[in-house]
Amino acid sequence: NTNQTDTLLRIDSSSLETWLETEKRDYDLLRRYYSFHNRNVLAGEIMMKQAESEENVHLKERIQCLTRAMDSFSAALQTSHSRIAVTRRFIQGRDGFFDDQKVSLSDLNSRIHSIQEKLDIAKIQQRVLNIVELSENVDLEPAKSDCLAYSLVNVSDLYNEYASVLNLFDICLLIIETCRHDQRETITYLWKNIICEEILPSVTNSESVVDFLNNLKHNTLFETSDVLIGEDPNGQCEKFDSGEWIARLKNRVSTLGKELYNTGTSFTFPLDFLVMELEGLRKQYDDVRDDIPSQPWPIQSFIEAEIPFSVLLESYDRLLSEYSASRLQGVDYSTQFRRLSNISY
């Protein structure tokens, strides 16, 4: 049982260590053995070897190994008080033998940073895998599916061979954020696709809405999507005038905003652009539904994304200074500022 196993692992024995390495070949038991004896760097190395193994190891197990490696190296860092910290032994070949070497605190910090990057990407890869497994519309080659499920895909391939190809716009933004790549045009392009995905194809009774949506979908993957006026003969279009798309879009912006904006950077959540487009959509909807009160759902989505009020006010201030009323399709600036000011108190 677990208690008996823990008791055995607490025995400081080179014979037990050799047996765990060469005979039992149980990586987790070996990690626990090293952890019990405060040999945390070795425990971390063992987990990294398993996480990056060329064997058929499922992604969930690899993520678990990376997490344990992070914990072990962090523990080694916390218990180290000298510049030359603790003994590390590199695994050589497939026979499980080790060579003793020294590891510095700077090396420990470097390893922790490297593992965190691998772990962040692996968790995004797990999200892609979940989408692929749950979706009936994803057509992925068996070899690519296996690679996604049983290996650590490098970040470039994860973006180009999976997220981009499968039109997973949210995932693309998360990868860009994780890699700290400030690619403004690409980020704007992805957000335009996200907005279009929630609204198009669409049908409306307003020519102004048609013009707005046609401009919005320009240079996106939805450029050929229908924007119809009057009737939808095939019954395939979103009814813009019903406003049913608002809740979905609002939820998607706020959910993704929470992940992107509060990570220490904000370039993947282009607030000025989003304010402009969402307020434009709000104004178009208000014009076709003048029978119901206007709802400030764009502001609500930003608040739910935990954007600071001061940042919101600054964004609207910039738009007031830089764009004409026609650029925002006639948004009532004074009303928006009054609403924002009231919310911020």
Image (cartoon, rainbow, N blue to C red):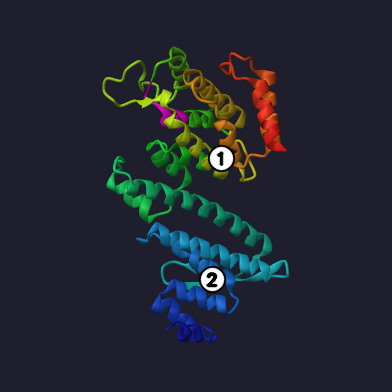
- Asked which quadrant contains residue 58, the reply is bottom left
The amino acid type of the residue labelled 1 equals: Gly
Rendered view: 31 above or below 143: below
Mark identifier at residue 233: none
Q: Is residue 158 left or right of residue 309?
A: left
* Residue 197 highlighted magenta (yes or no): yes
Q: Which residue is mark 2?
A: 43
* Residue 221 highlighted magenta (yes or no): no
- Asked which quadrant contains residue 37, the reply is bottom right
Q: Nearer the viewer, residue 158 or 345?
A: 345
Real-space CA distance between mark 1 and mark 2, rounded to the nearest whole angstrom = 37 Å
Q: Is residue 293 left or right of residue 20?
A: right
Secondary structure mainly formed by the magenta segment? helix
Measured from the top left, where is residue 193 in percent x and y? 45, 29
Q: Residues within 10 Å of mark 1 (few under 14, many from 20)?
A: many
Name which residue lies at 45% across and 17% down: 209
**Which region of the structure is painted magenta?**
193-203
The amino acid type of the residue labelled 2 equals: Ala
Determine whether the residue tagged by mark 2 lies in a helix, strand or loop: helix
Measured from the top left, where is residue 312 in percent x and y? 66, 33
Measured from the top left, where is residue 116 in percent x and y? 56, 55
Q: Earlier in the sequence, mark 1 or mark 2?
A: 2
- Asked which quadrant contains residue 233, the reply is top left
Q: Quadrant of the N terminus?
A: bottom left
Q: Nearer the viewer, residue 210 or 28?
A: 210
Measured from the top left, where is residue 335 in percent x and y? 65, 23
Rendered view: 276 above or below 27: above
Mark nearer the viewer, 1 or 2: 1
Mark identifier at residue 257: 1
Q: Are marks 1 and 2 in contact (CB under 8 Å)?
A: no
Determine whether the residue tagged by mark 1 lies in a helix, strand or loop: helix
